[in-house]
Amino acid sequence: MEPAVFYFTKDKELKGGIITDKENYFIALQPVPFPVKPEGRKLKEDLELKLSNSRIYRLQHFDTQYMDNDSTMQLQYLIDMKDIEDFLNFEVTEAKIDMKGTEGIRTYVFKLHKKAIQEQLGCFLKKEEDKEK
């Protein structure tokens, strides 16, 4: 799936979506600007997501990847299976990414495509259900 744009200004952007290894589900986020490879590889902090139910969820950092000849950095976070139902029923309203170094925590208040995570996760889960039938 193409990454959805969640936040966009002239200085910052956040895109992302759901990816799966067919066993687990991950939120993959692409923050812009992002640090160069040696510094970016140090980003291993967990992600804080706030959903529209006003609860804050902590997602464990899984991987950091540089893609498209290092023009895109993607952070992947594992969705705890006990929280899947909430991610299906509530939209994401805010993400906090610890960018380390001098910047610290970068907060993105979702302005665009707030339901993208719900919809993508639902699509993946429906595909899995259909395969089991």
Image (spheres, rainbow, N blue to C red):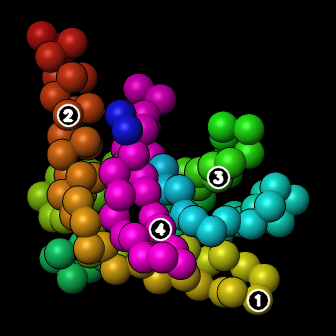
Above or below: residue 69 compared with residue 58: above
- CA distance separating discs 4 and 3: 12 Å
Above or below: residue 24 compared with residue 112: above
Residue shown at the point (66%, 37%) measured from the top left: 68
Q: Is residue 57 left or right of residue 114?
A: right
Mostly what secondary structure, the magenta segment? strand
Q: Of the residues tagged 2 and 4, which is closer to the observer?
A: 4
Residue shown at the point (62%, 77%) measured from the top left: 98
Q: Earlier in the sequence, mark 1 or mark 4?
A: 4
Say which residue label 1 marks. 102
Looking at the figure, which quarter contains the C terminus? top left
Q: Earlier in the sequence, mark 3 or mark 2?
A: 3
Q: Earlier in the sequence, mark 3 or mark 1?
A: 3
Say which residue label 3 marks. 73
Say which residue label 2 marks. 123
Q: Of the residues tagged 1 and 4, which is closer to the observer?
A: 4
Residue shown at the point (47%, 29%) measured from the top left: 21
Image mark for residue 46: none
- CA distance separating discs 2 and 1: 38 Å
Amino acid bearing label 2: Cys
Q: Is residue 48 visible?
A: no
Say which residue label 4 marks. 13
Amino acid bearing label 4: Glu
Q: Position of residue 61 (x, y in %)?
A: 59, 58
Q: Is residue 63 left or right of residue 109?
A: right
- CA distance separating discs 2 and 4: 25 Å
Q: Of the residues tagged 4 and 3, which is closer to the observer?
A: 4
Residue 60 is a magenta residue: no
Q: Residue furthest front?
A: 10
- SS for callout 1: loop
